[in-house]
Amino acid sequence: MAEVIQFPQRTETQTLKFDEKHAFGEIGGLMLSLVQEQDKADAPYTLVLFGGNDVFFPLGSFEPTLEGLELATITGEITLRALAVGHDNWSR
């Protein structure tokens, strides 16, 4: 007997707006940024990778404090360097 697999149905699409707190740079068509949900000071800082029209890949989130912002900035700088090395190796 065949088994029926049901997938969950999407109920609604939600649009979130973000404030860019820091743009780290672009490597090979991918943009690395630190964002926070717009008008929500208690929302976490999120390190995201953007690419093309449909790529939004959150890499990590950080507490919405000065320490969290500092840690997110350091993490973003390290991530950008790693992306640069990876891109250089892939393009050879």
Image (cartoon, helix red, strand yellow):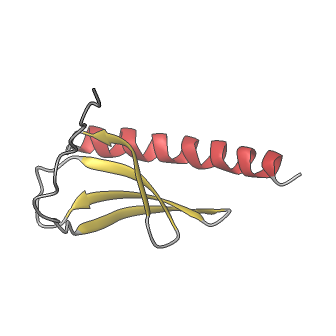
Can you give x and y, in whole percent of width and height, for residue 92 in the image? 89, 51
Depth check: 5 or 11 in front?
5
Please give the name of the residue rendered at 20% of the width and 41% of the height, measured from the top-left corner: 6
Please give the name of the residue rendered at 12% of the width and 63% of the height, measured from the top-left corner: 12
Quarter containing the N terminus: top left
Q: Is residue 63 left or right of residue 87?
A: left
Can you give x and y, in whole percent of width and height, for residue 41 in the image? 12, 56
Please give the name of the residue rendered at 25% of the width and 37% of the height, measured from the top-left corner: 5
Look at the picture and state if 6 lies above or below 51: above
Look at the picture and state if 74 lies above or below 19: above
Q: Quadrant of residue 15?
A: bottom left
Can you give x and y, in whole percent of width and height, for residue 13 in the image? 17, 65
Residue sitting at the far front: 1
Residue sitting at the far bottom: 53
Please give the name of the residue rendered at 28% of the width and 38% of the height, measured from the top-left corner: 67
Q: Quadrant of residue 86?
A: top right
Q: Quadrant of residue 82?
A: top right
Residue sitting at the far right: 92
Look at the picture and state if 8 lies above or below 56: above
